[in-house]
Amino acid sequence: MSLESDAQMTQDVGEASTFNREEEYRRAQISGTEAIMVGRETLETVVRQGEQLQRAEHMADDTVYTAEYANRLLRGMTWSGWLANKFSKPITCPEYRNQNVEASQESKRILKPLKQYETVPEVCIDATQSVQNYHLNLQVLEDCETEEQKETCRLICDNMYRQAILKIAEILKESERNDNESSSEEENNYKDFASQLSEDLSGLRQRQFVLQQLSRGVSKTATSGDQKAKLFDSNAKKNEEQELSVSDKVIAQQEQHLNIMGDQIRELGYLASNISISAQQQAEMVDSLNTKSDDLYFKMNTMNRRTEQLIKNKSWGKHKSEFAYYASIRHLTSGRYLSVDANNDSTLVLSNALNERCIFGIYKRRRFLGLQNKFNRKWVGQNMFGQINCSASSFDRRQEWDTDGDDWSDTTLLSVSAGWGAGGYLLFDEEGKGTPTIGGGDLATKTKAPKWCISEFHET
């Protein structure tokens, strides 16, 4: 009687443990399926966001083209601008990627174009060549058509990846040995370059995994309705399991569970890699949009200045200027003040001390400014030779200045009449030494132009 009760108890324990194990496996598989569904939804959202950014970039290209074309038309309304248009290239309409089949296919590629390194330290030449060779073979892997070609190319890529890793590791190991003894600037440079190579190689390796997942066809894993039904149906193979022993049943359950979880993990890895690559591409697109936004803002300001000048030239009467206040103009980098030279009242310099020569009357005429020095009562502007000085007796078009906006605490100064009406920025060297000059009116010159702080001056 006791033997029968012991056998019954063992059977009940085995059934209970089997039931608990099945429930645990099922919960894990359900969690994996839910994670895959979330990953797919996230990837779909990221792809939609990428398409929106691409459309925004196309709109930015179109707007920049419109602003450039409008500036060309406005410039051609003057004799000097008409002549400049005759000797300059016409504005070309932007060509979007989605209008070019080859460019559209190129944008869908997983791999980026081969990266070219401008300055390579002599110690890192072999490692750089290995990374570039690995990149080129990955491009071959992406273009392979048959499974046999892909497998052969994958083995070659794996071997080249290991070689590149070893060469980069040797450079980093050598740099660590030198750090313990003595480190020079050259050694620090090639150490940083080797670290950059390591990051690039890691990104290429991640893209290889995505390519391999694409070639294997991840759609086979946990995507069919039958397999989803099996995850939630614990009685799918009940008849077959009844014929197996307890140990065979446990092994079969474990193998089935591990296979399902392995497929789910592989698909999660594929989704994560694709999300990472898409996010990186979108970050680059956002940087491009920021650059184009700055360019567009600059071109719109140029167009507004040209329009303002044309309106002023076509109007019958002269626009009156209004006095705003007396102000000091401080060079933000050096902390010194724009002033007239003590030896020559018409020459502009930077002064360490704030005195009467550093005070300017700020006059407004529509959107432009006039700067009249309080000491000599002369206006700052261009002379007949295009040089900057403070010798004009009246506020004319050569004495008109423009700022970056309403915030004068951190702004550049642009001479409106310079560059045949395109404008030119007031330039000093980095330390504020020497005499000021008028540079170009393009965006590249603006980034190099010094910033000024125009603040109201109160007499004490």
Image: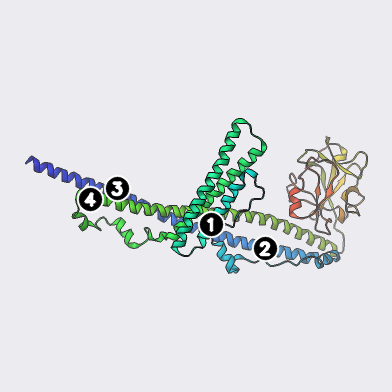
**Residue type at mark 1?**
Asn
Question: What is the distance, in whole Å, between disc 1 and disc 3 at their CAs?
Answer: 44 Å
Instruction: Say which of 408 and 250 sits in front.
Output: 250
Nearer-the-camera pick, 225 or 150 = 150
Task: Classify mark 1: residues with Cα within 10 Å, few (<14), some (14-19) or many (20+).
Answer: some
Foreground mark, 4 or 1, reads 1
Residue 338 falls left or right of residue 15 = right
Marks 1,2: beta carbons within 8 A: no
Q: Which residue is mark 2?
A: 63
Residue tagged 3? 24
Q: Which label's residue is closer to the chain start, 2 or 3?
A: 3
Residue 248, numbered circle: 4
Q: Position of residue 140 (x, y in %)?
A: 53, 60
Image point (53%, 57%), residue name? 137
Vertical position of residue 395 compared to residue 67: above or below? above
Name the N-terminal-most of marks 4 and 1: 1
Q: Amino acid at mark 2?
A: Thr
Q: Position of residue 33 (x, y in %)?
A: 37, 54
Q: Is residue 101 above or below residue 230?
A: below
Q: Which residue is labeled 1 in the image?
A: 137
Q: CA distance from mark 2 to mark 4?
A: 70 Å
Position in image of residue 229 (x %, y %): 31, 59
Distance Cα–Cα, label 4 vs label 1? 46 Å
Residue placed furthest toward the top: 181
Left of 373 or right of it: where is 233? left
Element type at mark 3? helix
Label 2: few (<14), some or many (≥20) within 10 Å? some
Q: Residue furthest left?
A: 1
Q: Give the structural element (helix, strand or loop) at label 4.
A: helix
- Quadrant of the image occupied by residue 97: bottom right
Quadrant where the N terminus lies?
Answer: top left
